[in-house]
Image (tube, helix red, strand yellow):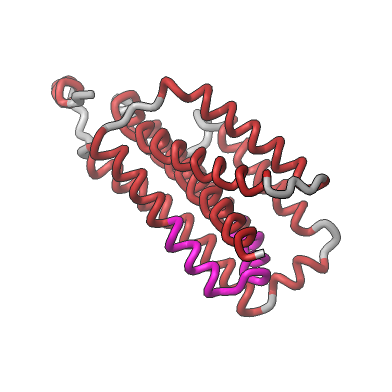
Amino acid sequence: MDYEPLNQMYEAEGYRRESLASYVARTYLWMFAGLLVTFGIALAGYMTGAIILVFQIPYGIVLLTGLELVTVIYMSARVHKISVGAARGMFLFYAALNGVVFSAYFLVFGVVEMVLVFGATALFFGLMAGVSLIFKLDLSGIRPILFGGLILMIVFGLLSWFINLGAFETLLCYAGIALFLAYTAYDTGKIRENYAYYSGNPELLEKASVFSALSLYLDFINLFLYILRLLNRSRS
């Protein structure tokens, strides 16, 4: 989509706004900030042994996961009411909670394997995001397919807690990787859409940037987890 006519319109109305490239870069910087918080806290929890204290709390991990869900749901429900600062704070709070949960992965898999999987995830994520940006992919038409795939992955993920899916779980890992690579391209395209749609409202534009960063953060985290599960299954 050509945004130049929109730029000229907003300039005529007295708006001063940043370029699309700057807006995309800032959105990704917030995503990277979230990842830095998550993996920094996760590594600190592992190195200090603080994660052991979480395991000693009855249903500690379950409570943390529930608090994460509440945070995301609250952010989504209050998107038009919370301030930009509150949205950023809640995003970083969510990333911090996730860091505590991720300390357990460091405990199970070790630092070296986690770093390797993080590098592989960053490579795949970066390639897909780059392709979406360079070729200006518009995947809005397959949103129902992506959402349906997400629901199926959640259902099978819950089933795997109670049923041994065997070799089928390996196929689920590949499907999960493909799904969140597609979501990465989709959510990258949404940044451009938000830039055009909310440019008339600087506050909503800022909040859209935070929510896009959260979506990309979740894409990265889920991609990371599926690659980690796949690597673990191949070794076992």
Residue 105 visible? The answer is yes
Please give the name of the residue rendered at 62% of the width and 37% of the height, measured from the top-left corner: 74
Position of residue 108 relative to residue 92, above or below, is below
* Vertical arrangement, residue 88 with respect to residue 97, above or below: above
Report whether 63 appears left or right of 108: right
Question: Residue 91: x and y, percent?
Answer: 52, 48
Percent coordinates x, y for residue 44 in the rendering? 58, 73
Image point (69%, 74%), residue name: 50
Secondary structure predominantly adopted by residues drawn in magenta: helix
Q: Nearer the viewer, residue 183 or 74?
A: 183
Give the left or right position of residue 194, taking residue 217 as reference. Answer: left
Instruction: Let me know if residue 111 is in the magenta part.
Output: yes
Does 158 sit left or right of 148 as displayed? right
Q: Nearer the viewer, residue 92 or 218?
A: 218
Which quadrant is home to the N terminus? top left
Residue pictured at 67% horizontal, 41% vertical: 70
Q: Is residue 197 depicted above or below 135 in this figure? A: above
Q: Which residues are magenta?
A: 98-121
Task: Point out residue 29 in the picture as x, y percentages from the top left corner.
Answer: 36, 52
Quadrant holding the C terminus:
bottom right
